[in-house]
Image (spheres, coloured by chain):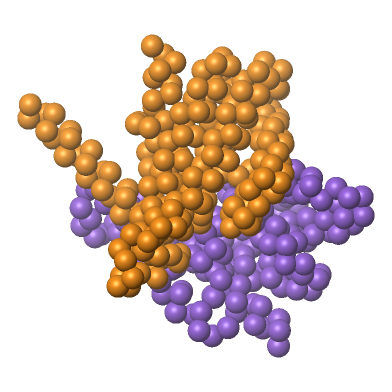
Chain colours: A orange, B purple
């Protein structure tokens, strides 16, 4: 089933930002807690689905020469919607994500999917592709957020994990922890893939 | 005196790449060779300064008086995209030598979140004109500095024996983490 494949590739062969090394800035910046990671992931997923659908609907109308500008306008419009909704209903989250909400506009994953997928495929595939990639992105953000929150603050969703005797690694809440955490996760995934391929060859 | 603190703060203490997490895609993308890193750094210094100045003027003179602040994101990204296109055409005609050097990096800058990020920070912090120009030049210099230093480190990877799963992006991110750790040391001075 093609539709299932388009959905599941977001978690497997094209899992952003590990398999598709794009959109690193929000990944590094907002993953200080799981909650922020999931909030950012949901916002990005919404923009990704909507922009994929609209770009796919307009794909025969948009002239190829100005397509990038058109895609950017489509994406920016949905980002403005997300910005307003977040300010109205999730004010604390929108404060802690700060300028990274308007910066969803320049998240290369969204423009990348519009250009590489939505502009060439039918609407339902484009929507499913957006959903899959978006949820994969959210999952990655949540995992990195969990690692950084547990190590950097000793909490998970704000609840204490290790008890009061645990001294948190403040480093993981700051910028170096973001880079090192993401690098290490990427390394572990590569190592796991290699291990699995070798096991498959021996079998 | 305040301006000196602003400059040091923007270049070292709150370095836009290593401390504020903006512009990481070109940071990992074009840092494999020294020459490309220098070219990208120059292109960013130029574009970021002009883009912040224009978006600042648009914000103060059009968006605020007409109550259109909610259109900020769309307006800024359109200004930046148009500016990049314009700079590219202008440079091709008048400064062919510079165009040759920077040409391929210019289109990439539209999706460089550092440019939009600095424009947004300038508006959010409510800088006046002088502070805004100084802040955006200093941020861009900080970007170029980090990019060139990182490219220097990355060139060494070619002669190092790196375990296969760590190669390329993974080791790049961990190296960036160590650089960011070093830059964290500057936080004592401002």
Q: Relative to A197, is A51 on the left or the right?
A: right
Give A171 or A182, whichever is nearer the viewer: A171
Which residue in the rendered view is the most extreme toward the top? A1
In the displayed structure, would residue B90 be above or below residue B129?
above
What percent of the width, then of the height, locates residue B2? Answer: 71, 84
Which residue in the rendered view is the most extreme toward the right? B65
Q: Residue at x 68, y 20 (%)?
A: A58
Give B100 or B58, whichever is nearer the viewer: B58
Among the 4 quarters of the image, the one containing residue B121: bottom right
What percent of the width, then of the height, locates residue B73? Answer: 73, 47
**Is there any visible trace of residue B74 in the rendered image?**
yes
In the displayed structure, would residue A53 be above or below residue A137?
above
What percent of the width, then of the height, locates residue B29? Answer: 46, 49
In the displayed structure, would residue A75 be above or below residue A9?
below
What percent of the width, then of the height, locates residue A47? Answer: 61, 35
Total numbered circles: 0
In the picture, which quadrant includes the C terminus of chain A? top left
Give B190 or A63, whichever is nearer the viewer: B190
In the displayed structure, would residue A8 be above or below residue A159?
above
Q: Relative to B150, is A53 on the left or the right?
A: right
Q: Residue at x 50, y 84 (%)?
A: B188
Q: Relative to A16, is A73 on the left or the right?
A: right
Give B169 or B34, whichever is nearer the viewer: B169
**Is there any visible trace of residue A72 in the rendered image?**
no
Q: Residue at x 64, y 82 (%)?
A: B5
Which residue in the rendered view is the most extreme toward the bottom? B1
């Amino acid at each position: 089933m093609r539709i299932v494949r388009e959905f599941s590739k977001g978690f497997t062969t094209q899992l952003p930002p590990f398999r598709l090394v794009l959109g690193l800035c929000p990944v590094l910046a907002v993953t200080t807690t799981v909650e922020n990671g999931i909030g950012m992931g949901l916002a990005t997923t919404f923009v990704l689905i909507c922009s994929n659908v609209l770009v796919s609907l307009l794909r025969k109308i948009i002239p190829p020469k100005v397509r990038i500008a058109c895609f950017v306008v489509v994406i920016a419009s949905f980002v403005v919607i997300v910005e307003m909704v977040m300010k109205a209903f999730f004010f604390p989250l929108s404060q802690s994500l700060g300028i990274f909400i308007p910066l969803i506009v320049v998240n290369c994953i969204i423009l990348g999917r519009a250009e590489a997928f939505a502009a060439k495929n039918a609407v339902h595939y484009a929507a499913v592709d957006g959903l899959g990639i978006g949820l994969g992105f959210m999952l990655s953000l949540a995992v990195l957020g969990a690692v950084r929150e547990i190590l950097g603050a000793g909490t998970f969703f704000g609840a204490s994990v290790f008890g009061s005797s645990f001294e948190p690694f403040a480093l993981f809440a700051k910028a170096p922890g973001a880079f090192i955490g993401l690098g290490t996760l990427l390394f572990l995934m590569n190592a796991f893939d290699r291990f699995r391929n070798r096991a498959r060859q021996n079998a | 005196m305040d301006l000196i603190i602003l400059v040091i703060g923007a270049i070292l203490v709150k370095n836009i790449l290593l401390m504020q997490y903006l512009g990481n895609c070109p940071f990992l993308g074009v840092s494999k060779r020294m020459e490309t890193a220098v070219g990208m750094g120059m292109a960013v210094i130029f574009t970021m300064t002009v883009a912040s100045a224009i978006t600042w003027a648009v914000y103060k003179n059009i968006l605020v008086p007409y109550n259109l602040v909610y259109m900020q994101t769309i307006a800024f990204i359109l200004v930046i995209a148009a500016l990049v296109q314009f700079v590219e055409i202008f440079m091709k005609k008048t400064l062919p030598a510079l165009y040759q050097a920077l040409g391929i990096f210019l289109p990439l800058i539209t999706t460089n979140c550092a440019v939009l990020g600095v424009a947004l920070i300038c508006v959010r912090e409510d800088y006046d004109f002088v502070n805004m120009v100084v802040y955006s030049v200093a941020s861009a210099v900080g970007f170029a500095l980090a990019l060139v230093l990182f490219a220097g480190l990355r060139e060494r990877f070619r002669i190092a024996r790196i375990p296969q799963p760590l190669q390329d992006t993974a080791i790049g991110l961990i190296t960036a983490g160590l650089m960011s750790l070093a830059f964290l040391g500057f936080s004592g001075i401002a």
